[in-house]
Image (cartoon, rainbow, N blue to C red):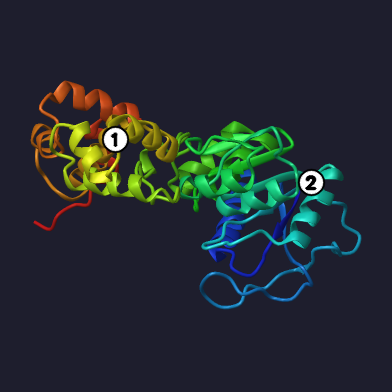
Amino acid sequence: MRIGILAYDGCVASGVSGFCDALAVANALAGRELFITRVVSRDGAPVRPFSGPPLCVDCPMNEPMRDEPLWDAVYIPPAFGLDAPHTELAAWVSRAHASGAVACAACAGVYFLAEAGLLTDRAATTHWGLAENFTVRYPDVRLTPEQMLVDGGDYICAGGLTAYFDLALRLTARFASSELAASCARVLLLDPGRARQTPYMNLISQPLHGDASIIEAQKWLEKHYARPLCIKALAEAARLGERTLLRRFKKATGRTPREYLQALRIERAKRLLESGNASVDEIAAQAGHSDTPSFFRLFKGLTGLTPGEYRKRFGIPLRG
């Protein structure tokens, strides 16, 4: 299987090399060359990645190496701080896909697939932190940012910045065998079962809606998250009537004030679980929950993990 890897200025270098390494491990474990990877750029010149030295490439994107067939798949690596996809590069993805290549991308690389028109009215995922911007830019894409991977058959989207490993495992399973993919995961110490981004997501994003009154309401909730919700006090902080507050808050944030407050409390609990040794009962109380069983249910509903599972996965060990 020939895979063209499109390198571009600002791409994450490990998103290129790590992806190649994962497929090279598959080749080594299989004892034969199942995957041939070629790194291409717009003109065949090295590109300047997000960090590190210039990234060398094998050939220009429109000039495959002599005597080699067309791509079986193309892959767009992630970027950090991507403002907009390059139209010319997106057009190359579109042409490769039209020629039969499976179009693959990770994180911000998914913008290229959307720009190429491959995701219209179809399911996709990208990094959870890009979800709001992506939805505004591509409203016709059915974005599911809670998913780590979306395999549409002729395209595959991977969510997180390092989800190129998940993508490499999926390609190995699809075009070799699930047994080989499992072997690669063991060798690379990867978790092949991380199907969702939910545990990694920040439940409270920066306000982009532009409603100054609702921003004031959000600030008030952030300051008083441990207190019982008082709509009257919240409306006074926003300088709005209560009914107007409820209507505009839902429109601006997509949540009711109660739902927003619950998310704030769970975010606070996550920080406490990551960096301390307090009991779950103590953390629930600090986060504004007097009912620990209710806190457990809400925490798992929003993160996909119990508080104990979250601490085990994301907790930072303290020095003894």
* Left or right of residue 118: residue 238: left
Question: Residue 220 placed where, x, y %?
Answer: 22, 46
* Closer mark to the observer between disc 2 and disc 1: 1
Question: Residue 140 placed where, x, y %?
Answer: 67, 37
Mark linked to residue 221:
none
Q: How dense is the environment of label 2, judged by Cα within 10 Å: few (below 14), some, or many (20 and up)?
A: some
* Left or right of residue 97: residue 229: left
- Depth check, front residue: 19 or 85: 85
Residue 32 appears in the rendering: no
- Going by the numbered disc 2, the residue's amino acid type is Asp
* Left or right of residue 227: residue 45: right
How many labels sit on residues? 2
* Left or right of residue 11: residue 279: left
The residue to which callout 1 is attached is 241
Report the residue at 59% width, 64% height from top. Answer: 11
Residue 155 appears in the rendering: yes
Question: Residue 161 placed where, x, y %?
Answer: 50, 53
First in sequence, mark 2 or 1: give its number: 2
Report the residue at 69% width, 48% height from top. Answer: 113
Question: Residue 172 placed where, x, y %?
Answer: 63, 40
Give the spatial CA distance, label 2 vs label 1.
59 Å
| Up-down relation of residue 211 to residue 309 (above or below) | below
Local secondary structure at mark 2: loop
The residue to which callout 2 is attached is 72
